[in-house]
Image (cartoon, rainbow, N blue to C red):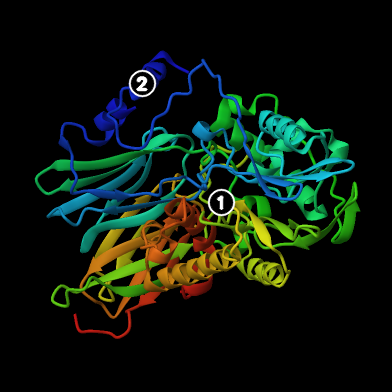
Amino acid sequence: MSLARRSLLRASLALPFLGGAITTQAEDFAGTYAPEAQAVADGIWMVRGADAPIEFANGGAIANSAFLATNAGTVLFDPGVSRAHGQALGALAAKVAGMPVTRVYVSHLHPDHAMGAAAFAPAIVHALPATREDLLRDAPGFSDAMYRLLADWMKGTQLALPQGDVAAGETSFGGRKFRLMALEGHSHGDLALLDHATGTLLAGDLVFHDRAPSTPHADLARWRAALTTLAATPHARLVPGHGPLDTQGAAIAQTRDWLDWLEASLTRAVDMGLTMSEAGALAIPPRFAAMKAARYELQRSVAHFYPALEERLLPAL
Amino acid sequence: MWTYHAARLFAGAEVRFDPLVRLEIPMIAENQRVFPVTLDARALADVRRILIFADLNPIPLALDYAPLRAQAFLATRIKLDQRTPVRAAALTGDGTWHLAGQWIDAAGGGCSAPPVSRVKGDWAQHLGEMRGRAWPEGEDPRRSATRLRVTLRHPMDTGLVENIPAYNLESLVVRAPDGAELARLAIAGSVAEDPAFTLVVEGRDASYTVKARDTSGLEFEGTIPAPHPVTAR
């Protein structure tokens, strides 16, 4: 790098402020994860993530996790975003459930759910075969992205691949009987867990609640089919991947409503000739007013779906 | 970099940061290889030229647009190689540049990772495939204008990827059936792979011929029919 270019780069730091947050992530990092457990049923706790995008301010702790107490130790469903996050969840699980974590399930590939597996022995971390395949391909990229966004929160987080050995069906662990459901649509492999004693359904990111669904690997037709399966699975309460506990049976319908609206709106936007920026600025209906991060997820979804919709809908010349 | 770009792009001219220039970009660069940018400077009169650039990109200037018989509106997708200001500049007939810009955070590599079609290996089978459509623009029937959207398949190689030389579209011209030029774009490798452009031309012609040319001299041509229902110009 020449001296002239260096001085130009330095000069760029004095650019007029143009809007958008310019954060400085200083060297005095002292962030610690402080997860809190909420008892939702006999022997089951939920840990709420922030209903926000992955940001340095929240350490990436945006996904929900759950603990299930068993006679053979605690089951942790979704170990968080980083090694420190996974460790904090493990410590909390041991405290509230009375036994250390002896089994971990990763619901799907996304880093806010999967990368905290680094805090646990690989032999006890399980996922669907599709999720392991996804992570073999995408984990290095996720790691780069998370270290860039979260910096020191990610310290020591090595790539940890789960065992891709989860099969759909009835099973039990430490005397606790549950059903593992191998679904897809939010990603290529979405694991849901139904606890039989309490009727608690851990839905992973197939279900969002009062927080807009994210779609980076979504197949909307398959996602709808998975929602139909979940809706047809009797349950007393549902722990969504993001957002508050659902005891009213509302979250599955809300997730479907958003996906239907999203697909219809983007299809119409392409058909009307809107640009991607204009589509990202579409009015969001009032019925979604309670949904956190709605504008943010709409703009992400435009990026995910728009080029393919154009390919399908614009006439060839 | 601002000092450098300003000296190079706007040498000697008056430059004004102007809220009449609207730059619409998403709040997140979800894909640093495909970042949408929409510029609307129609609140200004007599716009002669429009530039879209990103200060900290290795190929900063993405588009240089001459809206000959078109409105001061342009949308496309660009690559971002890192966190950078994204800016749009509109030159009015009095020689003044009107600017808008916003910082956007972005993961690295938008310009320096190979394009998807190079990785898939199918770029040559689809090179130059063009899609497009026209729509009536605006609600004022007395001032008819036509929105054109056109997409082309092109790898738009930046030259910054090992063993892949620069290869990109370098121009795109829209003509009326009588051959009159309506809009002319100069295009750089920092425009996203499989480029998409949205323009708004004045009036309504029976059809619009789009001719693009790349840095190997290949030319791609397509004709967009007028929107339905056709109204007299």
| Nearest the eye: B207 or A75 | A75
Task: Tell me which label, 2 or 1, sits earlier in the chain.
Answer: 2
Residue type marked 2? Leu
Residue type marked 1? Gly
Residue at screen point 69% across, 63% down? A236
Which residue position holds label 1? A243
Which residue position holds label 2? A8
Secondary element type, mark 1: loop
| Nearest the eye: A40 or A67 | A40
Location of residue B195 in the rendering, given as x and y in whole percent from the top left corner: 46, 57
Q: Residues within 10 Å of mark 2 (few under 14, many from 20)?
A: some
Q: In this view, does B79 lie to the left or right of A67?
A: left
The quadrant holding residue B121 is bottom right
Location of residue A297 in the rendering, given as x and y in whole percent from the top left corner: 49, 53
Q: Do labels 2 and 1 share a chain?
A: yes
Q: Nearer the viewer, mark 2 or mark 1?
A: 1
Q: Which residue lies furthest to the front in this view?
A: A42
Residue at screen point 70% across, 24% down? A156
Label 2 marks which chain's residue?
Answer: A
Q: Which residue lies furthest to the left in this view?
A: B94
User: Would you place residue A6 above or below residue A93 in this image?
Assistant: above
Location of residue A53 in the rendering, given as x and y in whole percent from the top left corner: 51, 44
Location of residue B210 in the rendering, given as x and y in whole percent from the top left corner: 37, 67
Let me know if residue B132 appears in the view: yes
Circle count: 2
Residue at screen point 60% across, 44% down? A48
